[in-house]
Structures are given as C-alpha cells and as structure tokens.
Amino acid sequence: MSQSISLNSKNLNNSLNNTSDSGVYLGSSRIYSPTPSSVACRALPENLPVDEDGVIKVAPDATENRINRYQRQSASRSLLPDKRVFKCLRHKLAKNVKVLKSTEHAKCHYGDLLVCGSVWDCPVCAAKISERRRLELTRAVEQHKSFGGAVYLITFTYPHGREDNLKDLLDKQSKAMIWFYQHRTYKELAKRYQKQGRVRALEVNHGEQNGWHPHIHELWFLDLHLQDFETLKLEIFNLWTKACQRYGLGLPSWDHGVDVRGGGDAAGYIAKFGTEDKKPTVKTWGIEDEMTKANAKNGRNGSRSPFQLLDDYIDGDKQAGALFIEYSKAFHRKKQLTWSRGLKAVFDLEAMTDEEIANHKEDKAVLLAEIEPEEWKAITRTSTPKHDNRVLLLIIAENGGADAMRLFIQDLVNRYKSAN
C-alpha cells in the first residue's frame, strides 16, 4: 500500500528555505555559500592553488592529506589485486620512472607510471577526478544563475538494514529511479517547474547499526525560482514512495526520504565537492563536494565513508577491508556523476573520461631525476600502507631537492638488498 502525504497533514519545517550566507549545518558538516561570481565563466578557472595531484589546496595540512591518499591507495591495492588500482602509480610505462617538478607550484609528481583513473577504488585518482568534476559543476551552476535560473539540491533515500547487500540495494535503487523519471507525474512536474536538466551523484556510507546507506543527490536546474520548497518536496516524495515500494526498497519516511534545498544550501553543497576528508576532521563542504567527493568524505553519526574503511583496514580492522571489497564490486562501472542529456552542451563543458582527467597534466614541469628499475623496485617493495615510500620520496624531493632524494633512495636500496 502506497503512502501519500498532504501539506495539511504535516507541520513542515520552514528552515529548509534558509539561504543565509553565514553558514548552516548539513549533518555534522558546516557548509557555506561560495563567493558569488559577477559573470558566468566560459572556461574552467585557471591559476588555482592546486597540489601535485591536481586537487585544490584549501587547508594548511595538504601534505598530510597527500600522505593519506597514498596510504589509502596502498590499502586498496592490497584488497583489490585484480583491479587497475593494484598497478596505479607503481607499474612502469618506460624503463625509468621520472620525478617531475611543477614550475608553477614547485610540487613533484611521477611520470611514466600507469594511472588507473578509478574514482571508486583509488583515493589518489579520485581526488584529482573529483576536483575536475567540482569545477564543472561550479561553472554550470554559475552560468545557469547568470541566465536567470535557479539550482536546487534534491536528495533521495530509503530504508536499509544491516543485513542488506549493497549491490542489491543499488540495483533496486536504479530501477526505482528509472521508473520515477519515466512516470507521467514526473514529466508533468518537470514541465510545471520549468526544469531544464539535472546532475545526479551516487553516495554511500556504512554504519554499524544500519549497514550500507546508499542515496542519491541531484542538482535540478530550474528556470523557476521557488519560495515554497515544501510543495515540491511533497510532490517528489509521493512519487518516490511509490517507486521505492514498487521495487522492494521499503517505505521512505517523510523526514528522510526526500530532502529539497536551494539557495545557499545548494551552492554550499557544491563547494563541499572541493575538499576531501582526512582522519578525522571537520571541513567546509559544499554542494559540488557532496556531489563529487562522496566516497572520500567523513561519514555522519558514526558511519564511515568508503575511504574511511581503508583507514580502519590499515589499523587492523579486517571487517572494514571486507566491506571495502563489497563496495568496490557494487560500484564497478558506475558513474560518479550523470548529466541529463544535452545539459553539458548547454554550458559548453568538455567531455573527459575519468581516466583522461587522471592522466591530464595541468601545468609545465621540469625533470628533476630519473629512477632506475632496481631503485624503483626497492622503493615499492619496502613500502607498507602506513609507510608509503612513493609519497615520502616526492615530499623529500620538494623540500630537499635531488640530492636529498638520492640519499633517501640509496638508503631504501641498501635496506632492500640486506633483507633479500
């Protein structure tokens, strides 16, 4: 039996319409509206303070975040020996491995190494890919607003339990969303609200009590400016409830099944796409981040994001490792972001695959050194997830130059030879 709710039957919270620039809390994270842009840009922003992995630096502890990415990648490869992440930034594409230094940012990175381009499995690639996607979202939102439109954040979720299988939940969720968008009620709603398109992002975290918690975030691009979010929520909720029941997802609650936000909340959600989590922290997180960095962000209310599962696995939690494997299998071949047909073209966004983004070099770099095969073998084989020599070498090269890097490599070679 389907559930419908009328506006007269609920005392709805008007706080959803809060668009204050002073910042609001979304779960456990404080989110802010981004600085308004006077004109919509026609190209992705240039000269941004990015680190060596192509991620915007927004915190003084960028080095710690970078080390954490490599630690997590090492943990992921140990769990996924049959996936591309196993060889990412380890497998050589030429005889020697290059160490390159950015002439603009003075940061080092590797050349002639395989890059996996997996946004789900690889924390290093995910950071760079998600940053690019965040910039695309920011550009689209700014342009749409400059044309007089408005952007709203819609979140869909449903009941879940500790025994639920993640892949089964995602399969049912996908079928429910297809039915939702094919229904005549939605098509009428979209026409009435002057909807021009949407961008969808998948997110999941895991909690001890209720297991996997997959949900969907969407940015709706409307030509209509809303004063009453509750009416739109009611219409979406009634149709979403029918979709969930039809495909065995249970009965969503009014409080959590559908959330509609706009104004400052929607903009802040995008800005959140531009930061990444670490262990543990609270950072400014906005709508683009919610959309594009879901797998990296801190879980709420005691739950863990997929990459936080890797942190716990490194610390000896084997169950966390098993959960990450389940997550990787469930999200295999799924897209991080899905744009409705024709929407990217409206904003003149270049179509780039995740792998193309991961392999893209943003700035000019000079060759600092080349690492011989036996040296690279020593660097990788003496590494552990907690002590990854690859990232330590880059940091030493940046701060001490080629001579300090050579001393570090020679020490690793000596240690490797003595152990073998």
Image: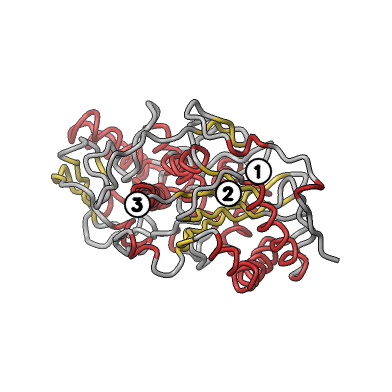
| Residue 353 in sight | yes
For residue 306, the mark is 2
Q: Residue at x 19, y 41 (%)?
A: 102
Residue 1 in picture, x, y percent from top left: 86, 66
Q: Residue at x 28, y 52 (%)?
A: 374
Q: Earlier in the sequence, mark 3 or mark 1?
A: 3
State how far apart marks 2 and 3 are (Cα): 37 Å
- Circle 2 or circle 3, nearest the eye: 3
State how far apart marks 2 and 1 are (Cα): 14 Å
Residue labelled with disc 1: 317
- Left or right of residue 73, residue 346 in this image: left
Crowding at label 2, few (<14), some or many (≥20) Cα neighbours within 10 Å?
many
Q: Nearer the viewer, residue 223 or 319?
A: 223
Image: 81 above or below 267: below
Residue 104 in picture, x, y percent from top left: 17, 38
Residue type of the residue flagged with mark 2: Pro
For residue 91, the mark is none
Residue 18 in picture, x, y percent from top left: 57, 34
Residue labelled with disc 3: 147
For label 2, the SS is: helix
| Residue 322 in sight | no
Crowding at label 1, few (<14), some or many (≥20) Cα neighbours within 10 Å?
few
Check the image and name the residue furthest to the right: 1
Where on the picture, by quarter, is residue 209? top right
- Left or right of residue 110, residue 151 in this image: right
Residue type of the residue flagged with mark 1: Asp
For label 3, the SS is: loop
For label 1, the SS is: loop
Crowding at label 3, few (<14), some or many (≥20) Cα neighbours within 10 Å?
few
